[in-house]
Image (cartoon, grey):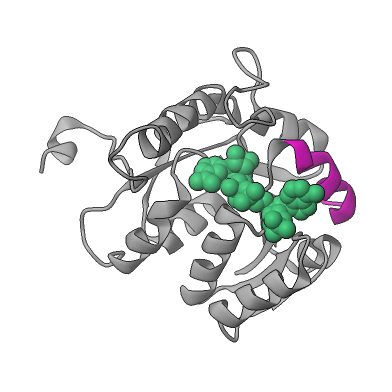
Amino acid sequence: MKIGILGCGLMGGKLGVLFAQAGHDVIFSYSRRRTKLDGLVRRAGPTASAGTPAQAVAAADIILLAVHWSRVDDVLAQAGDMTGKTVVTCCVPLDASDSELVVGHTDSGAEQIARRLPGARVAAAFQTTPSEVFAEVFAVRDRPVKANCLLCADDAEARRAAETLISAIGFAPVDAGPLRMARYTEPFALLTAQLAYGTADGPDWAYRLGKLRYVIE
Ligand SMILES: NC(=O)c1ccc[n+]([C@@H]2O[C@H](COP(=O)([O-])OP(=O)(O)OC[C@H]3O[C@@H](n4cnc5c(N)ncnc54)[C@H](OP(=O)(O)O)[C@@H]3O)[C@@H](O)[C@H]2O)c1
């Protein structure tokens, strides 16, 4: 797959490097420092490159949207036409201090993004997992028992794209259903962030969900 990364911070940078190490082509974009994008390309290896958001979108089969909620308008404006594209968003609609959801109850960030991109297929994934676990999950990806990662989508192709990205890191995907389930996964993201950053136990939190026989095996 060709994966375009919009936003190369903790999420986009780390996930993009691991997608490339898993064998995908990755195009990094949307950092204030070109040197940062070039460094990610070096770490990711020969299947990676860097460009503008528009170049990343044009080249990609799947686009990972990984910016602060306040930057969504800007990055989508720079990305240009996304008609026919498949977008996986990990964005959580947080305020400037990253402490409160600014969308919720009857709507979600993921649904707002889907409405902003009426010609695109949109899934939500990786919202509920702190970036600190990705490298370790990837390192143990061949083990049979895996951490889970929730996703939701209305569109079958978007769902497959999210499952592809989640599996590439080494998580087992859990399909929560239609995109409106992001109304529940986005608040859950704040719980996972609280566990990761609000306790003295370190940020390497992951979760497993499932039928009892699966969870306790
Ligand atoms: N971090 C987590 O563990 C985590 C977990 C779950 C969900 N999320 C969600 O994932 C999304 C991305 O989070 P993140 O932690 O990867 O964010 P981040 O580290 O702040 O990265 C955001 C990216 O946007 C870029 N950007 C470009 N122009 C910018 C501007 N004017 N102001 C600010 N940033 C600008 C940043 O550029 P630079 O490279 O120049 O900084 C960076 O590459 C957010 O919606 C967040 O809520 C994060």
**What percent of the width, then of the height, locates residue 47?**
60, 81
The secondary structure making up most of the magenta span is helix
Q: Is residue 17 visible?
A: yes
Snapshot quadrant of residue 99: top right
Question: Which is more toward the observer, 115 or 5?
Answer: 5
Q: Quadrant of the C terminus?
A: top left
Kindly give the residue lying farthest to the left in the view shown: 217
Stretch in magenta: 70-82
Kindly give the residue lying farthest to the front in the view shown: 200
Q: Is residue 208 above or below residue 36?
A: above
Q: Is residue 165 above or below residue 174?
A: below
Question: Which is more toward the observer, 90 or 118?
Answer: 90
Q: Is residue 205 above or below residue 194?
A: below
Kindly give the residue lying farthest to the top in the view shown: 106
Question: Which is more toward the observer, 136 or 5?
Answer: 136
| Residue drawn at 81 percent across, 35 percent down | 116
